[in-house]
């Protein structure tokens, strides 16, 4: 059973768990098992068509699955699947393209 | 020579000369001047026209350096002990005319006599950076590279503050700071280059003051602005390395675009809550930011520190890792985080390393990325729109 490492930003959706063991033969299976167990992660990980969202990077151990076989990459018992969204810290994301005049950075 | 013999006993057998006497002899010519220290000591400062022979090499090399056993040889070291032993060894080899400088180069300098120092480093600098120049991987050469380097920091906030502090301490000669913000009390939990007296002041000015007090060797260039498409090329073009401490995605993508165009390395880090990430992007040598994150995440997957909080020390840990990367790039030592993404989780104190590859389809640095003609160099896509999804 591969272990999925859940990034901090997703942990509220996995009841605070940082590591989740799942059944899965492939990375895709493992992530879908995660989404089954924690349904609120579904939209964050997958597009409506069931593909991995482009802004989520997934690694099998230390290698991006995009250079392997994507979601079909095999994931065995001793493997770790790492989910990694980008981080930019600081300021709140603006929802519109218009720039507000008053910037406060954090 | 018995190894338990004292240095005083050795000195009784050899001739010692005071620095002033030695200098007179040297002026008159015909003297072989030998420095019996280690290479790094020699590089810091040595006597004019001195030839370096390390203590362990004296017996093996002296014949080649001074073939004439009758020639006058003057030896010196740091304080007169190693050179005394070397003079004794020469005596045993049949050099009857060798003398050691009493008190070594220390006494020489204390007596006001001149030494040769590497170009660009004053006596004060030699003292200030001595803990750097002692490191064989750095040395005077590496320190001079740092003094001549120009580093730009995007953001004088969470990451920029600790990075700037330590880069200034290290002697990075020119540091540019890009930030249009003012110091706020909530910054002081982590932006340690500022302080309570500076609340309300522009961050770049506050940083400049701190750096001036820490290291007058550093010239700070304030860019009190936010990086955008209209200024990014102008701002980054004169720097050697860029530290990305930006607080939003559009700026990171814009910076990536511009730095790849101008082939500027970027050390990029980000922090949130108890976690941090860092990687070093060297255009065309390794991946770029876009190779790593082709698409920005939606807002709910990328909260800000202002919303979610951040442990103050995280800024220090990651900012200093950035400074470390900059120093390695400037000096050209070690292995920078090119093609590697380092994740740090402070709650369990764990580092994780992930591989980052160049994306063959990268629209910025991939083989099929459009060539940007000179006339288009300053034009960029609207990254605000890109990030708004």
Image (tube, rainbow, N blue to C red):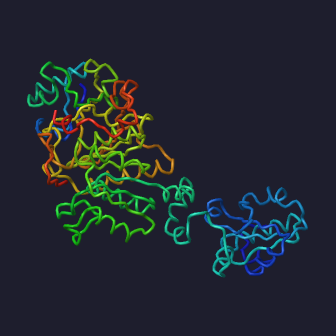
Residue A99 percent across, percent down from the top left = 15, 46
Locate residue B222 relative to residue B117 in the image: left or right.
Answer: left
Above or below, B161 against A53 in this view is below
Q: Nearer the viewer, residue B371 or B63?
A: B371
Q: Outermost residue, front direction?
A: B375
Marks counted in the figure total 0
Instruction: Specify the quadrant that holds the C terminus of chain B.
Output: top left
Please tell me whether residue B209 is drawn above or below residue B17 in the rendered image.
above
Residue B372 place in picture, x, y as percent: 38, 32
Q: Which residue is at the far left?
A: A39
Image quadrant assignment for residue A57 = top left
Quadrant in which residue B223 is drawn: bottom left
**In the image: residue B130, left or right of residue B86:** left
Q: State the image quarter where residue B23 is shown.
A: bottom right
Rendered location of residue B387, percent (x, y): 19, 36
Viewer-nearest residue: A16 or B133: B133
Which quadrant is home to the N terminus of chain B? bottom right
Question: B261 or A48, which is in the foreground?
Answer: B261
Residue drawn at x 43%, y 69% as measured from the top left: B216
Residue B145 at x, y percent in the picture: 52, 55
The answer to whether residue B65 is above or below residue B385 is: below
Left or right, residue B135 beside residue B309: right
């Amino acid at each position: 059973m591969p272990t999925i490492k859940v990034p901090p930003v997703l942990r509220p959706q996995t009841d605070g768990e940082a590591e989740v063991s799942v059944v899965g033969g492939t990375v895709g299976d493992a992530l879908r098992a995660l989404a089954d167990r924690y349904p609120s992660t579904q939209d964050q990980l997958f597009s409506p068509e069931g593909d991995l969202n482009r802004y989520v990077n997934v690694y099998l151990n230390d290698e991006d699955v995009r250079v392997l076989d994507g979601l079909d990459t095999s994931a065995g018992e001793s493997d770790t699947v790492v989910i990694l969204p980008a981080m930019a810290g600081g300021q709140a994301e603006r929802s519109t393209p218009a720039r507000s005049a008053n910037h406060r950075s954090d | 020579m018995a190894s338990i013999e004292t240095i005083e006993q050795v000195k009784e057998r050899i001739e010692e000369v005071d620095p002033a006497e030695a200098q007179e002899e040297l002026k008159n010519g015909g003297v072989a001047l030998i420095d019996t220290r280690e290479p790094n000591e020699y590089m810091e400062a040595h006597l004019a026209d001195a030839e370096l022979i390390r203590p362990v090499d004296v017996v093996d090399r002296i014949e080649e350096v001074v073939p004439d056993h009758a020639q006058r040889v003057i030896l010196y070291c740091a304080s007169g002990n190693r050179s005394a032993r070397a003079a004794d060894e020469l005596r045993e080899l049949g050099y009857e005319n060798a003398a050691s400088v009493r008190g070594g180069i220390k006494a020489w300098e204390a007596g006001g006599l001149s030494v040769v120092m590497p170009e660009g480093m004053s006596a004060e600098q030699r003292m200030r950076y001595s803990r750097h120049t002692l490191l064989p991987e750095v040395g005077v050469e590496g320190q001079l590279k740092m003094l001549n380097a120009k580093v730009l920091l995007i953001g004088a906030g969470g990451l920029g503050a600790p990075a700037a502090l330590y880069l200034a301490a290290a002697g990075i000669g020119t540091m540019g700071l890009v930030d249009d913000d003012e110091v706020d009390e909530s910054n002081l939990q982590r932006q340690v280059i500022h302080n309570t007296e500076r609340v309300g002041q522009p961050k770049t000015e506050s940083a400049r003051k701190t750096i001036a007090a820490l290291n007058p060797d550093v010239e700070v260039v304030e860019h009190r602005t936010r990086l955008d498409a209209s200024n990014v090329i102008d701002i980054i073009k004169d720097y050697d390395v860029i530290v990305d401490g930006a607080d939003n995605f559009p700026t990171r993508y814009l910076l990536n675009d511009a730095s790849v165009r101008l082939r500027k390395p970027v050390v990029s880090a980000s922090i949130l809550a108890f976690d941090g990430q860092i990687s070093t992007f060297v255009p065309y040598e390794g991946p770029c930011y876009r190779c790593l994150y082709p698409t920005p995440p939606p807002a709910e997957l990328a909260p800000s520190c202002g919303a979610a909080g951040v442990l103050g020390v995280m800024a220090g840990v990651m900012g200093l890792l950035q400074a470390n990367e900059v120093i390695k790039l400037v000096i050209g030592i070690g292995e920078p985080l090119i093609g590697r993404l380092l994740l740090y989780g402070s709650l369990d104190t764990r580092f994780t390393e992930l591989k980052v590859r160049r994306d063959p389809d990268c629209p910025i640095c991939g083989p099929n990325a459009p060539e940007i003609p000179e006339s288009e160099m300053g034009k960029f896509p609207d990254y605000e729109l890109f990030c708004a999804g």
